[in-house]
Amino acid sequence: MDHERELLMIPGPTMVSPRVLRALAKPILSHGAAEFTEAYTETLRLQKSLFMTSGTPFLISGSGTLGMEAAAANLVENGDRVLCIENGFFGEKWQEIVPGHGGVADRLTFEWGKAVDLKLVKERLGKGGYKAVFVEHVDTSTGIGNPIEEIGKLVKGTDALYVVDSVCGIGGMPLKMDEWGIDFCLSGSQKAIGAPPGLSLFCLNEKAWKAIEARKTPIADYYTNLKRWRPIMEDPKKYFATPATGMVLGMLEALKIIHEEGLEARWKRHALFSKAFQAGIKGMGLTSFPDEKSLAHTLSVPKLPESVKGSEFRAAIGKFNVITAGGLGAVADKTIRVGHMGSDMVNDITATLSAMEMALHQLGYVKEPGAGVGAAMKVFAKA
Amino acid sequence: MDHERELLMIPGPTMVSPRVLRALAKPILSHGAAEFTEAYTETLRLQKSLFMTSGTPFLISGSGTLGMEAAAANLVENGDRVLCIENGFFGEKWQEIVPGHGGVADRLTFEWGKAVDLKLVKERLGKGGYKAVFVEHVDTSTGIGNPIEEIGKLVKGTDALYVVDSVCGIGGMPLKMDEWGIDFCLSGSQKAIGAPPGLSLFCLNEKAWKAIEARKTPIADYYTNLKRWRPIMEDPKKYFATPATGMVLGMLEALKIIHEEGLEARWKRHALFSKAFQAGIKGMGLTSFPDEKSLAHTLSVPKLPESVKGSEFRAAIGKFNVITAGGLGAVADKTIRVGHMGSDMVNDITATLSAMEMALHQLGYVKEPGAGVGAAMKVFAKA
């Protein structure tokens, strides 16, 4: 079996364009070479455009988690009350990260896969006194998409900083940082952006900078101290720590691809992927685990019938060279997670649904395969 | 001019083997795929062998600086006295990092480029009460190589943890973590190891783990909390944060190349590079900025005559497609820094010395070029 020809349909890392792979394979450049510093500058410019912000872009070596920590390490200090809105595995990380930086995490928890109830957010915000509000755009554990714009409207009426983790959203779903009042927005390279894992990227606006400048206590961390990185992000000819030169070139290529496609077109493509995928799983007799009113467009998380175990299902799909991800937590074996984002094409979606349906046929759950992928095909053909 | 054919002779990032570049360009693997987790396991095994330790290896997304912070964040807590031995730009970072994690940095400072005086180290250690000792193996700012084995012997007589930053040493110069009593040793991917920048790697021994377990206060950080990462490093099938899959494959290839060459042979090769390079710069009338009794083998830092400015010299060398680095700090324009490590070949060294000598000829400092590179050639021919 040729692993390099498999369809990697997990919700990150995702397949990347051969254009990106070729950029990664270029001989190493000096981090001080004009060719590199100009590429870094251009990458940061395109990152700002992707985030739809006039704020400061940061692109540094690390995983998406590092961006979450950077938010807490810079914006939160001793005794600060922070509202953590959670409805999945990744949202639950905030209350592990925030206390380390002195913050008091006030958790507003919804069941995994359930939509955020804006009324409860409003009510909680009404108590006042929050330094910041943390929330996931998409919780990749369940395929839920959270109402970032609407939460932003509620936060706007308070003094709190609005921090959004869009690791699995940006590049695939609308996210308008400035328009939606987001003060700190973070993502990772390896999901809807279509670059390899290894880079943490985020943007800060003036309100976030003012909060950092107004801190009563110094920032404890060194590597995530954004005051140390800021001069480099404003002028990549400066030095703080050696950048991952090849990864930045790969990211530049991925961002150029996004720019060439256009953000609106890209959002539409992902919404269509989601619609087709949902039609497909229903056509083969499955349902959606996350609340259908609040679906992420970047992945789908079908709920499996009692007779089909997630691990067996994934193994059967894998025999058709399609790689999917397992469920997490309490629904580990009752769901699977399928990414459809970034560089993915319609062909990848139909092939994936076909593999799923063949697997369900082999497992005895689907008698006559074709109805699932057929339902998706109708959606694509009509679009 | 073809940038991809230039000789990148800065002290990191360094040129990497096309074998490594090809590994980076492979289609993205799932971080959960057996092909990847087995490669990660093998990479960590080879990393331990490179560090000459039976301790726990860590390989995570980030720059070398992240490893410095991981040492401080995990080993140091409020009020701990820490001895920071410094003789250059990178050593000076410790006293910026340590206080953020509650440590009290006791600085033992030597002039940039001057060797560490072991008598003074012994004297300072005699005061007792240190939680840890931090030192650079090589300070890349000056080309000094510090006596890590000898300092280790002095630290061994105390309770202190011995932390060594070998970002610009390991893979090019002897470093025997267990034998030399090093408790925490860190490096970066992009120097003598011969992989691209973007990965932080370090190893901890049992003494370091015991100190972490015995902490009175919890580790504040999340991303650099090694207790969270340890299960993954012991079994890469587990998950904490998405690893930089392609970068790990590149690192595996680089470590395989090291293993094939053999550590002893590699150390000898770098010692020879250093000897030839020193002969070369003397042959063209330059001297060494760092103390000749304590030279790093991974880079050379020639001191320039009054009539030759570093920036002009580097520009002239660059016209021959050889990229060198500028001096730092007070000797910024009075030195240049030339890396000779990792995947570099004899050919690269002679070509670099030739370019330097042609540049000095053009600048009017060398009348008859050839004596410099000739002196290096003699060293190589005799080896």
Image (cartoon, coloured by chain):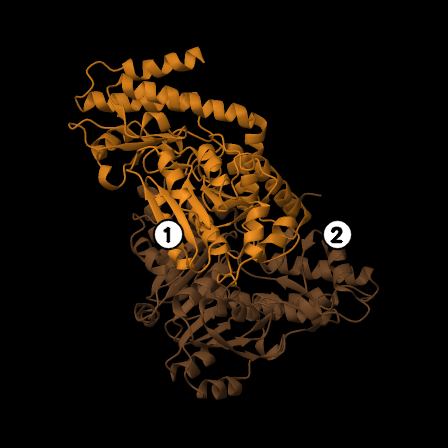
Chain colours: A orange, B brown
Q: Is residue A283 visible?
A: yes
Q: Quadrant of residue A98?
A: bottom left
**Neighbour tally class for label 2: few under 14, some 14-19, many 20 plus, Cα within 10 Å:** few
User: Position of A260 compared to A288: left or right?
Assistant: right
Question: Residue A316: x percent and y percent?
Answer: 24, 29
Query: Exactly how many numbered labels are in the figure?
Result: 2
Tell me the subunit letter for badge 1.
A
Return the mark for residue A105. 1
Question: Residue A318: x percent and y percent?
Answer: 28, 31
Q: Which residue is mark 2?
A: B319
Q: For numbered disc 2, what is the local secondary structure?
A: loop
Tell me the subunit letter for badge 2.
B
**Neighbour tally class for label 1: few under 14, some 14-19, many 20 plus, Cα within 10 Å:** many
Real-space Cα distance between discs 2 and 1?
57 Å
Q: Quadrant of residue A203?
A: top right
Residue occupying the point 66% across, 71% down: B279
Q: Amino acid at mark 2?
A: Lys
